[in-house]
Image (cartoon, helix red, strand yellow):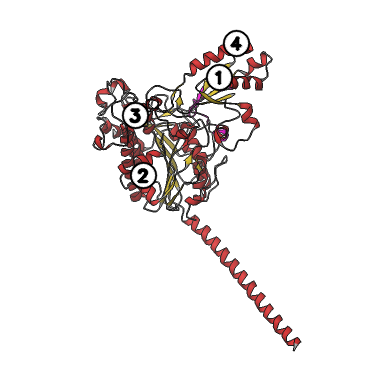
Amino acid sequence: MKRSLFVALLAVCFFTNTDNVNAQKKSKRKNKNTVEELASVSVKSNPKLVVGIVVDQMRYDYLTRFYNQYGEGGFKRMVNEGFNAKNHHFNYAPTSTGPGHTSVYTGTTPSMHGVIGNNWYDKNLGVNVYCAGDSNYNSVGTDGSEGKMSPHRMLTTTVTDQLRLHTQKKGKVIAVAIKDRGAVLPGGHAANAAYWFVGKDEANFITSSYYMNSLPAWVNNFNASDAAEKYKKPWTTLKDISTYQESGSDENNYEGKFKGETTTSFPHNLPALWDKNRGFDIIKATPYGNSLTADFAIAALKGEHLGKDNITDFLAISFSSTDYVGHQFGVNSKEIEDTYIRLDQDLERLFNELDAEVGKGEYTVFLSADHAAIQVPTYLKDSKIPGGYVNYKDMSTKLNEWAKFKFGSEDLIKNISNNQIFLDHKVIANLDLDLQTVQEAFAQELLTFSDVDMAYTAYQMWQNEYTRGIPYILQNGYNQKRSGDVLVVLKPGYISYSRTGSTHGSPRVYDTHAPLLFFGKGIKQGSTVAPTEIPDIAPTISALLGIASPNGTTGKPIEAVLEN
């Protein structure tokens, strides 16, 4: 009896284990099939086209502040159909156009990619250099020097480079902007083409011999069509100005004027101001510059046959005019409100063309900014909010006088730019001074200036690893070979700029908080207030496409954005 019971139990265990093993094998086969299916789906479902949009100087609150003014097909379409990262920030400073575009596309910060400003002091050459300038190449499409550009000062690859490598250069990359740096840097090192606008009396989109020796027929046709001519007209508000309740008064002391104007208010009579404002250059500082960019981007979409096969292409677009308008008229102006209302229409027009040319659900779009902007400090002061202005020339004079008393020389400063002080290491060595000691002395002296809030030395950037706060942001912007000896942080609300218009560049939240929207193929519908950072954009797109991330990537994919 006992033996029979034992045999029965043994049989049960055997069949149970066999069932478990079979179940595990079946589960493994299922999981393997699922993984293979997902991998297959991921490859097969790649968008035919990725469109990267950078809106120059866009604060996050332009999305919410003007939301009721927007139509259904632009910003709202991205929000309603896509994903909104509401707590998105630049994690480095200086916050400016060159570093911003580079960081979006490289997935890292100036500490890694090396673009530490629009211009910066080159410590080896002893001169200021431009982030996209390159005298080794010639202009294509103009007789001027505006085309002498390349991405050679960008040290790492971009997501656009990685797409080119992944597809054996079969996937096209085209970059478009009014500003040269807004096209050159996003396009990466391996772009098929980058195009930017020359105004004055030319009104043409041009490029560099880095990319090609002559313009394609579709670009020549666009330029010959006098596409910019239709924007030689007065700038009036798109809607009744009385409905622009989300901005300040039209006539005020916080805005700049075009040359030849006597008032800051609408309308701005561009034809009458034409000659005094370098001809077609004036449209750069109006929403018409964005409309012209959209026109050219749509021409590129069609002329390059983007998104017409199963090999993913990339169209990088930078809307630069928002920055020009912000600098001239300020964050709180009617001009900014009108510019974003009009940009919303340009986005809708672009998305409609993408629907028609590539197909709904066959492309993916992301939209962010290269930096945000501060409210005009004079407006802040008049509103009883702390704000003010700093003159770095005066600061330099005072520091030189102090240095002569402290160290016996007034030749220790070589350059002050991008809120950094570059010291003359040779002079310091000749005086038999210790560099770290001199850096710390300058930092301590800077803290005696009433408008300076913080000062950090290069030695601190080298020796410490900061994980939060202002030092973390500064360290991400600090490149060991290119950055200065002392980093200056002004008090909140303080800038080095004119008394009218807005600017940017600081590690403060008003310069770091930018929008991040995704929509289209492979994108979830939703939103998050979890923190995300600018370097997260490129690895998110890389994960979506199943390609390698840029080779300097420090960001991480935003998992909540992706469907799989």
User: What residue is disc 3 on?
Assistant: 285
Res. 518 in view: yes
C-alpha distance separating marks 3 and 4: 44 Å
x then y, percent, for residue 4: 73, 87
User: What residue is disc 2 on?
Assistant: 75
x then y, percent, for residue 95: 48, 32
x then y, percent, for residue 418: 51, 25
Above or below, 32 against 113 in this view is below
Q: At label 2, which amino acid type do we have? A: Phe
Q: Which mark is residue 404?
A: 4
Q: Residue at x 43, y 36 (%)?
A: 194
Does the residue at mark 4 contact the one at mark 2 (Cβ under 8 Å)? no
C-alpha distance separating marks 2 and 3: 21 Å
C-alpha distance separating marks 4 and 2: 56 Å
Residue furthest right as drawn: 3
SS for tag 1?
loop
Residue furthest front as drawn: 384
Q: Which mark is residue 90?
A: none
Above or below, 132 against 516 in this view is above
- 378, 507: nearer the viewer: 378
Label 4 Cα crowd, 10 Å radius (few <14 / some 14-19 / many 20+): few
Q: Nearer the viewer, mark 2 or mark 3?
A: 2
Q: Could you tell which of marks 2 and 3 lies nearer the N-terminus?
A: 2
Q: Residue at x 69, y 78 (%)?
A: 14
User: What residue is disc 1 on?
Assistant: 448
Q: Which residues are drawn in magenta?
A: 110-135
- 64, 356: nearer the viewer: 64
Q: At label 1, which amino acid type do we have? A: Thr
- Residue 69, by quadrant, is top left
Does the residue at mark 2 contact the one at mark 1 (Cβ under 8 Å)? no
- Residue 22, by quadrant, is bottom right
